[in-house]
């Protein structure tokens, strides 16, 4: 499991996940879309709500027509657990104070 993928942050709260899904599909960071929607709120609340609803419908239709394959983590049962030896753990050496 990769911890470096910033777009797959499922532990963070979301309203419907529209920005994250569109960001994943089109390859951009979802915060760009979130900022654009926040700036749009200054000009027209109704327009932003309508745009968000339209994007939500696009995501819904795309997920119904082409659902994502479920990812399963495969763990090999016969693989031995990693062994940590004393040589592998390096401790800093301190000089003795005079």
Image (cartoon, grey):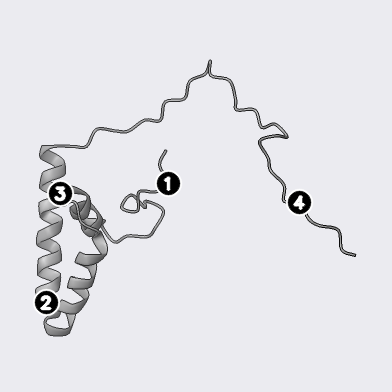
N-terminal of the pair, mark 2 or mark 1, is 1
Corner quadrant of residue 69: top left
N-terminal of the pair, mark 1 or mark 3, is 1
CA separation in Å, label 2 and label 3: 21 Å
The residue positioned 26% from the left and 57% from the top of the image is 16
- Nearer to us in this view, 33 or 47: 33
The residue positioned 15% from the left and 77% from the top of the image is 40
Tell whether label 3 touches label 1 (CB within 8 Å).
no
Spot occupied by residue 89 in the image (x, y as percentages of width and height): 68, 40
User: Label 4 belongs to which residue?
Assistant: 93
CA separation in Å, label 4 and label 1: 31 Å
Outermost residue toward the bottom in this view: 42
Are there few (<14), some (14-19), or many (20+) residues within 10 Å of tag 1? few
CA separation in Å, label 3 and label 4: 58 Å
- Nearer to us in this view, 33 or 48: 33
- Nearer to us in this view, 62 or 20: 20
Q: Which mark is residue 3?
A: 1
CA separation in Å, label 1 and label 3: 27 Å
Q: Which mark is residue 46?
A: 2
Spot occupied by residue 67 in the image (x, y as percentages of width and height): 18, 37
The residue positioned 11% from the left and 45% from the top of the image is 62
């Amino acid at each position: 499991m990769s911890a470096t993928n910033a777009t797959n942050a499922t532990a963070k709260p979301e309203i419907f996940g529209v920005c994250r899904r569109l960001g994943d599909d089109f390859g951009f960071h979802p915060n760009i879309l979130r900022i654009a929607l926040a700036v749009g709120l200054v000009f027209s609340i109704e327009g932003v709500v309508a745009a968000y609803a339209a994007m939500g419908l696009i995501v819904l239709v795309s997920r119904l027509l082409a659902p994502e394959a479920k990812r399963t983590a495969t763990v090999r049962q016969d693989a031995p657990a990693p062994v940590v030896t004393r040589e592998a753990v390096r401790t800093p050496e301190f000089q003795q104070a005079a």
